[in-house]
Image: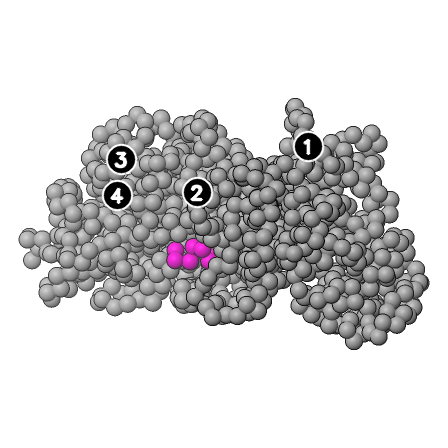
Amino acid sequence: MVAQAWRVRRNWLGYRFSGESVNAWPEARVTMLLADPVAIKEVTSSRARFPKPVEQYKVLSFFGSNIVITEGDEWKRQRKIAAPAFSERNNKLVWDESVNIVLDLFDNVWGTQDSITVDHIVDLTVPDALHEVSTKLHMKVILPDWVLNWGPTETIRRFKLAYDNLERYMAEMVQARKTAEKKEERYDLFSSLLDANEEESEGQMKLSDSELIGNIFIFLIAGHETTAHTLAFTFALLALYPDEQEILYQHIKSVLPNGRRPNYEDMGSLSYSMACVIFQGHFFQKFANTDYSAFNNRVFNETLRMFPPVLGIPKSSAEDTTLVTSNAAGEKLTVPVPQGTYILLHTPGLHYNPRYWEDPHVFKPSRFLGDWPRDAFLPFSGGPRACVGRRFSETEAVAILSLIISRYKVEVKEEPQFAGETFEQRRERLLKCGSSITIYPGFFICCVSWILWKYFPQKIGKSTLDNIPGPPPQSFWKGNIDQLFDRHAWSFHQELNEKYGSVVKLHSIFGQKFLYVYDPKALHSIIVKDQHIYEESAFLIKTPVNVRRSPPQTAEAPESSVLDQAYAPHDASILPNFSQGKRASCLLTVLGSRLWRKLCDAIESGVRAGVGEVDMLGWMGRTALELIGQAGLGYSFDPLVEDVPNPYGDAIKNYLPVLSRLQILRRMIPFIPQVGPPALRRKVVEMFPHKGVKHLISIVDAMHTHSTEIFEKKKEVLIRGDEAISQEIEEKDIMSILLKANIAASEADRLPEHELIAQMSTLTFAAMDTTSNALSLILQLLAEHSDVQNRVRKEILEASNGGDLPYDELIELPYLDAVCRETLRLRAPATFVFRETRKDIVMPLLEPIRGVDGSIINEIPVPKNTGIVVGVLASNCNKAVWGDDALEWKPERWLSPLPETVSEAHIPGVYSNLMTFLGGGRACIGFKFSQLEMKVVLSLLLSKFTFSLSDKPIVWNLAGVRYPTVGKDSTKPEMWLKVGLLNNVA
């Protein structure tokens, strides 16, 4: 019965057989649905006996207490302050603003177009944010905050975004007005409310900020939703009945000849025209001599009767009492109403009651011209608690209808899928509706649904970032995400650098704003000075790749290694093993002679066998994996004897390419790791219908499985004692030292096993992918520049003199070093990294930028939770720092002093004034290890082989770490070069 009663299409069905008073079950207590005007009038006029059940209005209290949800003295207090806002002076303001906005719509939006198509667009614009909140506010009641923050569905995410934006905007409205130095005289509803509140001399009578915000929300909901939705239904009815629309048009012309602008004084005549000419033209003659002003807005009333904004008005009984009503046969009866009974004044049941409304399903505005049952009309409630803004709504409706119908003819858009439908089918389709706080059209969205918002200054979502220049978003849903992170987005990044400057405003999903930054001073703040504020982005730390059934491992960008709370102990444990050049030298000296010769032998074997083209990315990846395996983990992944796939290496190589294709998804569901046990999270991700997610699952499984196997073997060796450790790994690899240190640590400082396993995956990934791809970049550039290749080879051969180069001599080879530095500058493997502000902060700038409004900006207030993209590549290629040739690959620039602008910029990078390895506390701890590895590999390869381009085009794709493919269409990481033996190699 309850479900039936709330459906407009079944508005009178429940009462036809049961009478005008119906009990609804099941409930915690009895609920009575009323559709009897006599009983309803008694309820609405007796506030003491039938107060509002305040607890049922909790859904309207989240923004603050307000006039709708209060009773008794509290309601009187709020009513006293709110009432002046609805004065006759403000009614005229409503009229003038409505006229101004519609005329502005004509002139600046629709222009000279003869035909305007208004589609069913659901987007979080200003009014739609309000609509989103009003129709789904029940989510705030039934869903805990963690579910709203998680946002597991699109509906929840849209509601949360709209709710937050609306709350922030209303708070800004109040604070801006309260802190304004000069109080301007204003007459809008909001200003009237604040003025009345400020005039209260007694402190206890004044409304608090939360109460002001609560009332603003109610005014927006009541004013915007009711009027906008009713207008939408009105336009739909006009489109369905074109003859009546024509009669209305002719009458409006008679009131406003020659397109005259309507004045507030015209309202009576225009209201009359709407009352009597819509449905039957002969009523115009019948009531031609009637007092026009007595018939305000009858068309609007008829629409309100058929589609009441609020379907049910809750009341309750404060005492044991009775109500007189009628049964199905029309007989009077007295119904006992126990104390605590819920009473629902059911407006559809009342408005479609055939005892009071003849042909209730027929649209007949004329029914309001003569004597009509006023007690059976309840769109704005009744009695002392009737809507205080009814006059506002009527005024707005008359102005909007008059102007739009005077200029445009409203028709139903013809669409192929609805060809051949009958009038009844079309009527049913257009007037289909849904309900929540207010009733709203489910298909026909009126173009003027945003009108009332203009009574309130500015618009929702105002941000301190609005004045920062940047490209427009591609769409509200995805912003610039696809443009920024598409694997072929190099041209977009170049456009950002050349067109917008060193700080650029971009848009993420749902209109969220974030910054793309490469200004040197701003980078110093982000990376060094204020790094505790610019932390890892939440969507990186909580990326939903945690799909295993065991405790979680982190899944972050290459530059991160651990969750925030675990970063310090991890860093302290690992840093010494990377930072000591002597240790790095020792590791490479012990392993190099074995490992690099295996690589060279394998490639030489293929070349001698007639294999002219070699996938050098594959070999560089395998070599880097084996090096970090032996030097970092004390484990051998690959014998490097033949060209065979390695599951672990393949998983690491495919990890970032796959992850980069999930940018939108990662931002939409960043909180899955916090919800439920690992097994549940795994099941949720497995069910996700996305090919990329499935691929990611297999990659993470492979990485975790191999890491766990290695860890268990290392732990087993460790348990056997120091002597066994010495024999097995000689205590040289990083993981063994870390394991030993962890066991020796106190219980409080000891890391759990799942974090050690996660550390292994991160260590392996970071050491393999970035270094191998950087080596591949260098080999490609050497293949393209044979003169540079020959010069580097000559330097290496002369220094080695037929033998192995000692560590100290290798790292000092100037031209080899210049080639490595220039490649890491111009082709940084990781082109950007992510940060997020943990609190409000002011970002300083080295060079001022020009705002959207033309002003000069020297610093930027950045709100809490703002995303930051650190433009690593943009900083490395900044012409203002590196000169006009910054985009050219010129190793020679490192053989002479760099421009003064480089040193003056104070770039916070840990390596050669570059951001390639970042800086500060989050700098790459293995950058020296990586540098040495690259130089060792290049020295050996160039001593034995020559490299040139093959016929397979090399295309580098943007991702967390850039990777090459054969052509643009392929997604497989690979890079083929022609490899030959040096003439002097036997």
Give residue 137's position: percent from left, percent from top: 66, 55
Residue sitting at 79 percent across and 37 percent down? 81
- Compare marks 3 and 1 and give the one earlier in the sequence: 1
Q: Tell me the SS state at disc 4.
A: helix
Give residue 728's position: percent from left, percent from top: 37, 63
Residue sitting at 59 percent across and 58 percent down? 237
Callout 3 crowding tier (Cα within 10 Å): few <14, some 14–19, many ≥20: some
Give the Cα separation between the discs numbered 1 and 4: 64 Å
Tell me if residue 173 can be seen. no
Residue range of the region highlighted in magenta in the rendering: 660-666
Q: Label 2, on which residue?
A: 112
Q: Label 3, on which residue?
A: 886
Q: Label 4, on which residue?
A: 823
In the image, farthest residue toward the top: 182
Instruction: Please report contact status of discs 2 and 3: CB closer than 8 Å, yes or no.
Output: no
Give the Cα separation between the discs numbered 4 and 3: 12 Å
Q: Main secondary structure of the magenta part?
A: helix
Q: Label 1, on which residue?
A: 187
Q: Quadrant of residue 579?
A: top left
Residue sitting at 38 percent across and 36 percent down? 500
Camera-nearest residue between 754 and 498: 498
